[in-house]
Amino acid sequence: MLVFMRLYAFYLKRTVKDSFTIGYSVVFPIVMILLMGWLRKGSYGQELSSFSYYTIVLVPFCISFEVTTAAYLGQEEVRKHAAERFLTTPVSTRKLLLAKFFAGVSAMSICHGFVYLFASLVLRVSFHGHGMAMYLMSIAWTGVIYALGLWLGLGMKNFIVVKNLINLPIMLFAVLGGCFYPFGSTDPLIQKVIQASPLTWINRSQFLAMYDSKSQLLFMMTIIFVLLCIGIMTLAVIKFRKEAFCNGDMFSYEK
């Protein structure tokens, strides 16, 4: 446990100060909320301001893009020329990955909390008493994305190929989930496609909690994400590859 806590503190400190973490988890969502909120100002009536709408839908969307950040931080040792040193120390792969996971999720969740705080204090966004429940779900969703990033980044040697394609389904899920504009259809086939997007269910659960006082789906999504975290991290430990950890190709131009 002592070794794990030291690794956790070490990675947490580095992750909080990392430019990718600040850029993707703080600057990017705030800029997106301000831009989309300003462009769509007055489009959602009196009960729901444009800034409220885009705070709700864009934070989970921005979290989805952090899969690249997670893979980037997972391969941090190779850029610091310290990967082999880590592998020769008496630290198990499980402890190493779990320390990375919990430190990354903690750091990014702090950043997301800052975004929610900014929206509440500066943009006057009200979460109608469900802010903490929404924040907890965002932490669970961050866990899923970060675990997926570690699995992909440290489970394959040629992650750069996947990295160039992974943004496509994220953007498709965002469009279907109404992250840029409310999206719907009466066509049964299109409805099924819309429901295939995890962002659809995330956003629906938040709106139901805030405006209909129905928080069951919100809590259900949180539990599902926690279970997914456990499953994906188990795969990340099993599929961990030393060559990916020591010779990560994600940002080879930095070597």
Image (tube, rainbow, N blue to C red):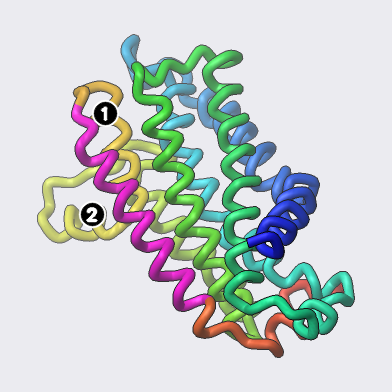
Taking the magenta stretch, the answer to whether it contains residue 220 is yes
Looking at numbered disc 2 in the image, what kind of residue is underneath it?
Gln
Q: Nearer the viewer, residue 131 or 102?
A: 102
Q: Is residue 76 left or right of residue 183?
A: right
The local secondary structure at tag 2 comes to: helix
In the image, the segment drawn in magenta is: 214-236
Number of numbered markers? 2
Residue 45 in sight in this render = yes
Magenta span: helix, strand or loop, mainly?
helix
Tag 1, which secondary structure? Answer: helix
Tell me which residue sits at (30%, 24%) in the image: 210
Asked whether 89 or 77 is in front, the reply is 89
**Residue sitting farthest toward the top:** 46
Magenta residue check for 180: no
> From what the image shows, is residue 64 above or below residue 203?
below
- CA gap between label 1 and label 2 equals 18 Å
Q: Quadrant of the C terminus?
A: bottom right
Relative to 89, 162 lies left or right: left
Quarter-of-image position of residue 48 = top left
Tell me the number on the disc at residue 194: none
Residue 248 visible in the shown view:
no
Between disc 1 and disc 2, whose residue precedes?
A: 2
Residue drawn at the location 35% of the way across and 24% of the way down: 130
Residue 172 image offset from top left, x and y in percent: 41, 58
* Picture quadrant of residue 10: bottom right
Residue 195 is marked as 2
Position of 1 relative to 24 (above/below): below
**Residue 187, percent from left and from top:** 12, 53
Identified at 57% across, 23% down, the residue is 117
Return the residue at label 1.
209
